Structure formats: C-alpha cells, structure tokens
Amino acid sequence: MRGIGRYKHLMMTTQEISKNAAPAGAPSLMVIFWAFLRLGCTSFGGGTAGWLHRDIVLRRRWLDDPSFLAMLTVGQALPGSNGTKLTVLIGQHLRGTAGAAVALFALLAGPFAIVLAVAGVYAGLTGNRTLHNMLDGVAAAVIGLTFATGLRSAIHGAPGPAAWAIAAVTVLCIGVLRWPLIPVVLSLAPLSIGLAWLRVKRH
C-alpha cells in the first residue's frame, strides 16, 4: 500500500509540473496513436527515451524540456522500461487515461508485429556479417542519441556546478568504473536532493 501511495504521489506531482506546459490544443487520440505507432516502428536499437524526446519535445512541441525532464525523473524512480513509462506519462498528460492507453498500445503494437516477422528471417541470417555491421551502426547512433538527451536534460533541468559535478560522478562511477547502479544511486541521490534543496532555499 505504501508503494502504491508513493506511485500516486509521483504521478500527481508530474501532472502538476507539466500542467502549465500543456499545449493550447492537445492532439487528438488518433494523432497520438499515429505518432507513437511511428515511434515504435522507427526507434531502432533501444534508447526509447531519446527518441521520445526528439519527436515529442523537439519535433512536435507537445512538451517542453522541463516537463519532459520531470516525467523522465518520475520514470527513473519507478521500476520498468523508461520508454514505456514515459509513453504512459506523456499520453496521460496529453489526453488523460485514454491518451495513456492509446499511446502505450501504439508504441508496442508496431514493434510486436515487426519482431514476429523479423524473427523468422533473422534465424537464417545470424551468420551474415553485413547484418551485424548494420546493427552495430544503429546501436552507435542510439548511444549518441541517448547521450544527447542526457546532456540536454542536464542543461535544462538543473544548471550549475553542483548539478554538473553530480552528473560527472554518476557517469564516472557507472559508465567508466562499472560500479553497480543501485549503490551509486542510493549514495548520490540524497546528496543531489540536498544540494537542490539548498539552491532553492537560497533563491
């Protein structure tokens, strides 16, 4: 019950943060469906959060950077795939419960059908060197997109030396030193929250 209460609180917080950034004319459910269906079918190589940022924030302007960052932060605090959590939060922000359901279904329906079709073909091409080179190239592009999303979030989310220091230490511990994620987050999160609290208090 405690976990459910925390989840509801996080959802309400996200809605309050993003309410002021809601577009004047929210897109229809059909527009949301086609947008997320396209995203699901074209976001190769994982890193769905990066693809969502590029399409929803930069291209369509349905959200601004602070709202997207708030949803990403809430998603990071909950278990599961960041892409699906962000999709639900964005859909809910745009069109409520119906928007969340439509966005999630559209995001997953396309890849589900594609994976079933590709699986049959891939079984006979596992030893093809060209195919592996293509997949390596796509993976590199996704890594770059994810890095760009993180960098943009750091710039727009909490500018300042303290925020950059926390981000740098996180990258060093997890990306370079390969330390376990959970201990790093449990150690740095209280420090980051404390620094943010002090910064707000000073202003």
Image: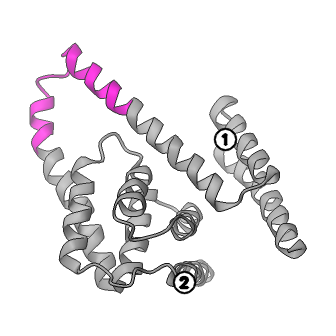
Q: Quadrant of residue 120?
A: top left
Say if the magenta span includes residue 65: no
Q: Which residue is mark 1?
A: 180
Magenta segment's dominant SS is helix
Q: Quadrant of residue 25?
A: bottom left
Question: Quadrant location of the N terminus?
Answer: bottom right
Q: Residues within 10 Å of mark 2 (few under 14, many from 20)?
A: few
At x 19%, y 60%, the residue is: 109
Task: Pick the residue in front: 177 or 197.
Answer: 197
**Mark number for residue 150?**
none
Task: Point out the stretch of residues depicted in magenta.
Answer: 117-139
User: Horizontal placement of 106 versus 80: left or right?
Assistant: left
Is residue 151 depicted above or below 1 in this figure? above
**How was this image coloured?**
one colour
Alpha carbon distance from label 2 to label 1: 28 Å
Q: Which residue is mark 2?
A: 8
The residue type indicated by label 1 comes to Pro
Q: Position of residue 160 (x, y in %)?
A: 78, 54
Query: Secondary structure beneath disc 1?
Result: loop
Is residue 189 depicted above or below 173 in this figure? below
Q: Are marks 2 and 1 in contact (CB under 8 Å)?
A: no
Is residue 91 depicted above or below 77 in this figure? below
Q: Position of residue 50 (x, y in %)?
A: 43, 50
Could you tell me how many numbered marks the image carries?
A: 2
Say if the magenta span includes residue 125: yes
Q: Position of residue 19 (x, y in %)?
A: 51, 84
